[in-house]
Amino acid sequence: MRRLLFIGILFLAILGLGVFGYMLIDGAGFIDALYMTVITITTVGYDETFPLSTGGKLFTVFLILIGVGFVLYVFSKMTGDVIEGRLQKTIGRMKMKNRVAKLSDHYIVCGYGRIGKVICRILEENNRSLVVIEKDPDKVEDIIEAGYLVLEGEAAADQTLKEAGIEKARGLIAVVSSDADNVYIILSAHGIKPELFIMARSSGEEGAETKLIRAGANKVLSPYFIGATRMAQQLVRPTVIDFIDLAVHGGELGLRLEEMVVRESSPLAGRTLMDSGIRKDHDLIVVAIKREHGEMIFNPSHATVINASDILVMLGGQDNIKALEKQL
């Protein structure tokens, strides 16, 4: 804006100089002087409206030089801005691709709408690496401002998915606006890496979930169904829902519902819950244990053995959970 203002002021100054010069040198009227100044600056070559004296002719040459210089200045600035903008954008894309290429065990979020924004925020809060694929240039700028890695392009294109590091990715989340687009994204991702965990958004339309699962999605969620169910449960079981909110999102009680994977080297592997000291030493409650083959044990007894690769679902204070993470 400052540059445009400067150019505007400079143009008016040249215009004023020309009008004043013709009126002073040849005694022209204001309109005639303005007309002569405009055709001289723009070099259109129309006939003069009044005879020019020798001084008037010399002034016209001077004014032409100024006018041509002004036009060249404006053109150079406009061209420079365009080239500089494109160059910066190209360099920015190259840097972004290099940063994405270094990712591993990350998540690919396809689509940055209302749902995509929340997913990215939660992944970042939990220290999960991610890259967003978005085709809308305006949204791409928003993603960059938010601090996320982003690739501009079609998420269903194999080349775009490969640039996003799908071969090294931990999972893909397809949350673009339509079921058809999500199906195409899933088919492409599943074709490149069949074992990749894929989560998809469903519109809730009849048959949409089935098609998304057939395409290769491991998990399909409908925000509308979840929202409606949550609202109904809040009416029917308000205390239960409030407790779940506290456990999942944390709150005044400082509680957190968290899951942890037991590593092979963990000292807890092979021990029973009683001997593990999870309740005694860390003041945590093991709500459930998910075995490696998928079996889920709810409210496990004190004699339940903890195996390597088990996933423990625990409830307790955030500080206690972090302390236990170091052991697992």
Image (cartoon, grey):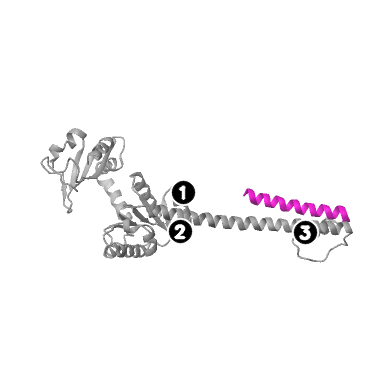
What is the quadrant of residue 132 in the picture? bottom left
Of callouts 1 and 3, the N-terminal one = 3
- Between disc 1 and disc 2, whose residue precedes? 2
Q: Secondary structure at mark 3?
A: helix
Mark 1 and 2 residues: CB-CB less than 8 Å, in contact? Answer: no
Which region of the structure is painted magenta?
1-27
Q: Quadrant of residue 209?
A: bottom left
Amino acid on which disc 1 is placed: Glu
Q: Is residue 48 magenta?
A: no
**What residue do we see at 35% from left, 44% from top?**
125
Residue type, numbered disc 2: Asp
Residue annotated with mark 1: 145
> In the rendered view of the protein, which quadrant contains the C terminus?
top left
Label 2: few (<14), some or many (≥20) within 10 Å?
few
Residue bearing mark 2: 136
Magenta residue check for 3: yes
Magenta-highlighted stretch: main secondary structure? helix
Any part of residue 43 in sight: yes
When the figure is inspected, residue 115 is found, relative to residue 300, above or below; the finding is: below
Above/below status of 319 relative to 293: above
